[in-house]
Image: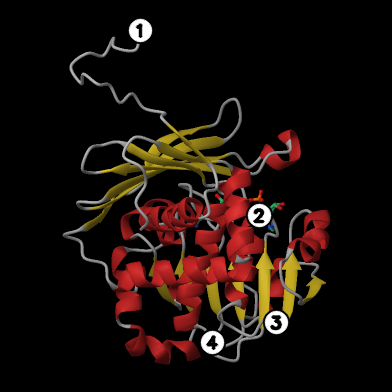
Amino acid sequence: MASASVETTAVLTATDVADVIRVVGIDQFMDDVIDGVRCAAEDLNPETTMTIERAGFQYEKPCLGLVEWMPSMELGRAVGIKTVGYHPSNPNQRGLPSVMATTSIHDTGTGRLIALVDATLLTAIRTGAASAVVTDILARPDSSTLALIGCGAQSVTQAHAISRVRPITRVLAFDADPLVAESLADRLPFAVQVEVMNSADEAASQADIICTATTVDIGAGPVISEAALLRPGVHINAVGADFPGKTELPMSVLKSALVVPDEVSQCLKEGESQQLAPSDLGPDLPALVQAAADHADHRNGLTIFDSTGWSLEDLIAAEIVLEHALHHEIGIHTELQHTPADPYNPYELL
Ligand SMILES: NC(=O)c1ccc[n+]([C@@H]2O[C@H](COP(=O)([O-])OP(=O)(O)OC[C@H]3O[C@@H](n4cnc5c(N)ncnc54)[C@H](O)[C@@H]3O)[C@@H](O)[C@H]2O)c1
């Protein structure tokens, strides 16, 4: 990582993040985050890289939502903390994204705030990247038809990331809101045939790869029914379940698949794995990547990535942006924190 100034904090707004991605190129940036997540999983050393299950406040008033924090640490270097809000009524009622986030990066030598980065787009990109890492290991190499169940913000980066690792030529789109499915083609950053489907099962049954990324209500799942006739060897990235009681896949599908959780304890609490016992789970994301060759046979069977969001992904994505921002002098670099001449005098600036 490029080193930041000793005194200043880099503040990277949404526009700054977009400027960085424009300079790097959207495909190259996605490839860099995919590589970043893959390498972090492959090289993971629990003695030096630590992540903590996310925690926070979940509430039903004034509307269903949560604000949570997702910490990770590279020992001797940096702590990343993403704060993230999830408010599924935001798009329709307030014109805001369902998921909004900010990542702070702190120097573990001093505790100083190195950077504050808008992480709304980065969350979508790193979530797509994590799906791509697992898809690359578990989906058949010739997978070309992708079903997107839920066509909101996450579906765009799911499709983009998966198109970087598999030759996707056809996207089957289903959303509970038909207008959202119909607008998907205009939001995708690559050329592909998009067909709007009448049901989740219709889309899922024709796909080689499925991504579920819905804001289905707690207790209202699954979004794919037990009756869906899934193709043999289909790989599913289940991205939407991230709340106790919220699930997208039916138990029968989960029970017959290799299930790869991103973060085991978090998935058992909030992911599809809520419906399973710990003994039903396959390798977690790092274990899968570390033994990728051993799992090649699973490409012929049903496989599921239970994605709830791994906090290290957020530090990786924010550091990639920060490095480019420092190199290209993008963003505000300001003395946000007090750096007094006399560290014993907190009133010095008064
Ligand atoms: N795994 C992760 O790391 C991760 C990261 C970010 C977001 N998420 C989760 O992914 C989900 C989607 O997020 P988003 O930002 O795309 O939200 P969004 O609001 O942009 O889009 C969600 C879409 O799902 C649709 N939907 C709701 N219920 C449905 C159903 N039963 N069938 C089909 N479509 C349905 C909605 O109409 C909406 O268009 C959320 O639950 C979010 O919390 C997970």
Measured as percent of width and height from the top left, residue 242 is found at 48, 51
- Choose mark 2 or mark 4, whichever is in front: 2
> Gap in Å between the C-alphas at discs 3 and 1?
67 Å
Residue at image position (34%, 51%) is 3
Q: Look at the numbered disc 3 and say if its residue's Cβ is closer than 8 Å to ligand 1.
A: no
Tag 2 near tag 3, CB within 8 Å: no
Q: Amino acid at mark 4?
A: Gly
Q: Which of 213/36 is in front?
A: 36
Residue picked out by circle 4:
233
> Gap in Å between the C-alphas at discs 2 and 1?
45 Å
Taking the image as shown, residue 109 lies to the left or right of residue 81, namely: left
Picture disc at residue 206: 3
Q: Amino acid at mark 3?
A: Gln
Taking the image as shown, residue 275 lies to the left or right of residue 188, namely: left
> Gap in Å between the C-alphas at discs 3 and 4?
12 Å
Residue at image position (21%, 53%) is 75
In primary-sequence order, the first of circles 2 and 3 is 2
Q: Residues within 10 Å of mark 3 (few under 14, many from 20)?
A: some
Picture disc at residue 350: 1
> Gap in Å between the C-alphas at discs 2 and 3?
23 Å
* 133 up-or-down from 85: above or below: below
As helix, strand or loop, the secondary structure at mark 1 comes to loop
Q: Amino acid at mark 1?
A: Leu
- Choose mark 2 or mark 3, whichever is in front: 2
- Choose mark 4 or mark 1, whichever is in front: 1
Q: Look at the numbered disc 2 and say if its residue's Cβ is closer than 8 Å to ligand 1.
A: yes
> Gap in Å between the C-alphas at discs 4 and 1?
67 Å
Residue picked out by circle 2:
153
- Choose mark 3 or mark 1, whichever is in front: 1
Q: Quadrant of the C terminus?
A: top left
